[in-house]
Image (spheres, rainbow, N blue to C red):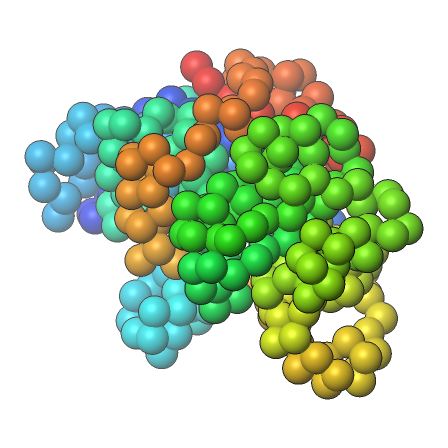
Amino acid sequence: MPLRAPGRDEVLIAVRAAGICHSDEHYRTGHSPVAHWPLILGHEIAGVIVAVGNGVPEERLGQRVCVHYVLSCGDCASCRRGREQFCDAYGMIGLTHDGGFAEHIVVPAVNAIRLPEAVSFAQGAILMCAGATAFHAISRSRFSSGETVAVVGVGGVGMLALQIAFALGARSVIALDTDETKLHLAAQLGAWPVDARNANAAAEVRSATAGEGVDVALDCTGLPSTTRLAIDVLGVHGRAVAIGLAGEPVQVHTYTDFLARETELLGSNDHLVAELPLLLDLAARGLLPLDVLALRTVPLEARAVNSVLAELRAYHAPVRTVITP
């Protein structure tokens, strides 16, 4: 692909790390259609600004940055209300515009967020989707310090949701998954592990919360069974948040699922640029043990990247894989 110079209010970034997300597999297979072909995938990006366009201060040259993948106009009603993921002209790096599975990428300067020195490029890349998605979902849940949290599916998003919940003051976090390795890792991070294959998984969560159920449940997988589980573990006034992309319907019973306990099922879509400095600050202060997440790096080669995407499709990938130079 030709290397384009940055235009007005844009920057050229030399990519130092690009996370491989399960969403990339959805885009590759057409489960979530991309805007056009050919298209460079990759929306978890960190690197160094190596050129700036007109309107961008030259002081930004050499700056370590990570990339907010939501492209928005900044002027429509949604943008003015701070809801840029619902922008009238919404775009997404790696879905509607070329992404970060490349040596360089051009993005609007406002999308290049300064990366603290204490946060590595690989960590910064992971935070731009898995971390930011988890942070926004927790915000959507109206989580308060001292509440209990269940994370259903502790892959990349789920493991970061677990860490963020602890960093924000969760009294306890329960991790549910079918992968013993991920459950073991979640336990190392302080979570109570529950095997979601167990038919009594919801009852086990209630037992771990003295019969009350949890205040917040995050469904990071999106399968009907995981959404169902997130609803089932809620206590009175509990809030379940749907995050994972699967596209299959889930059956609910209005009375027993929601009215009887006054519970809620909420959706969480993308994240906000205003949330990123708060998330990066948690990481810079050492409150998110991110080293456990960048478990594997691969080179920028088609065979290596496609192999990881195939693993993600089969739900057999490590917690996170990052492309590095």
With respect to residue 212, does 115 lie above or below? above
Q: x and y percent of residue 159 in the render? A: 57, 39
Q: x and y percent of residue 212 in the render? A: 68, 66
Task: Tell me which corner region of the image, top left, top right, bottom left or bottom right, holds residue 117.
Answer: top left
Q: Nearer the viewer, residue 52 or 308?
A: 308
Residue drawn at the location 41% of the way across and 46% of the way down: 167
Task: Tell me which corner region of the image, top left, top right, bottom left or bottom right, holds residue 309.
Answer: top right
Apparent side of residue 118 relative to residue 90 in the rendered image (left or right): left
Residue drawn at the location 62% of the way across and 23% of the way down: 305
Residue 240 shows up from this direction: yes
Task: Tell me which corner region of the image, top left, top right, bottom left or bottom right, holds residue 238.
Answer: bottom right
Q: Please tell me how many numbered marks the rendered image carries.
A: 0
With respect to residue 5, does 250 lie above or below? below
Residue drawn at the location 39% of the way across and 58% of the way down: 272
Question: Which quadrant is home to the C terminus?
Answer: top left
Instruction: Give the residue at the far right of this rendering.
Output: 199
Q: Nearer the viewer, residue 68 or 201?
A: 201
Apparent side of residue 281 relative to residue 152 in the rendered image (left or right): left
Residue drawn at the location 36% of the way across and 47% of the way down: 279
Q: Nearer the viewer, residue 70 or 294?
A: 294
Q: x and y percent of residue 87 in the render? A: 42, 68
Residue 49 shows up from this direction: no
Q: x and y percent of residue 10 in the render? A: 25, 44
Apparent side of residue 17 relative to residue 294 in the rendered image (left or right): left
Q: Nearer the viewer, residue 48 or 188?
A: 188
With respect to residue 314, does 241 lie above or below? below
